[in-house]
Image: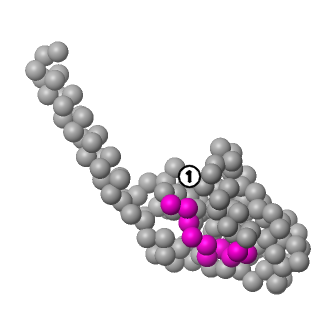
Amino acid sequence: MTVPRLLRAALAGAAVIACLAALASCKVDKAALAKQVALQDVDLRSVPDGVYESAYTIAPPPGTMAANKHVRVRVTVAAGRYEKIELLEPSGLSSSKMSLALLAKVQESQRLSTDAVSGATITAVAVLKAIQEAVGSAPK
């Protein structure tokens, strides 16, 4: 390998390491993100029984990344409770540990103001917001 090629490779490697270090140091403030997207609990007692769908695309805060910014959910409400919540899109996310844990927390607590799963804050807030919009769009 010639010196210029070696130098370019070293600089490229240093740039990749710097980018990875910057990403690793990014912390997402869940409370601020939830406030930004106006995430709030919905009074399910005012939501008629039924199946509701919604999608939500989140805009990650500057300097952060999210693997899944767009999500789509189907929510079944019965007797003023989250009876079933399904993550429809992206398809690979529906069986992930993060999404299964998050949806279980929402169903168990019957609240959207549940703690996001560590390491997936942006995606978790997008899922919670999609749930809010699904039930929030129900006829009153």
Please tell me which residue is depicted at 24% across the width and 41% down the height of the picture: 15
Residue 32 rendering spot, x and y as whole percentages = 46, 75
Q: Residue furthest left?
A: 3
Question: Colour scheme of this structure image?
Answer: one colour
The residue closer to the viewer here, 107 or 70, is 107
Please tell me which residue is depicted at 52% across the width and 49% down the height of the picture: 67
Residue 68 rendering spot, x and y as whole percentages = 56, 52
Q: How many marks?
A: 1
Of the residues shown, which amino acid type is indicated by label 1?
Asn
Would you say residue 78 is visible in this rendering? yes
Would you say residue 130 is visible in this rendering? no
Residue 88 rendering spot, x and y as whole percentages = 73, 52
From the viewer's perspective, tell me whether residue 113 is left or right of residue 107: left
Q: Is residue 113 magenta?
A: yes
Residue 113 rendering spot, x and y as whole percentages = 61, 76
Please tell me which residue is depicted at 69% across the width and 47% down the height of the picture: 95
Q: Secondary structure at mark 1?
A: loop
The residue closer to the viewer here, 104 or 19, is 104
From the viewer's perspective, tell me whether residue 115 is left or right of residue 46: left
Quarter of the figure with the C terminus: bottom right
On the image, which quarter does residue 114 sit in? bottom right
Quarter of the figure with the N terminus: top left
Mark 1 lies on residue: 68
Q: Main secondary structure of the magenta part?
A: loop
Please tell me which residue is depicted at 18% across the width and 31% down the height of the picture: 10
The residue closer to the viewer here, 65 or 31, is 31
Q: Which residues are magenta?
A: 109-118
Q: Dot 1, crowdedness within 10 Å: few (<14), some or many (≥20)? A: some
Q: Is residue 69 magenta?
A: no
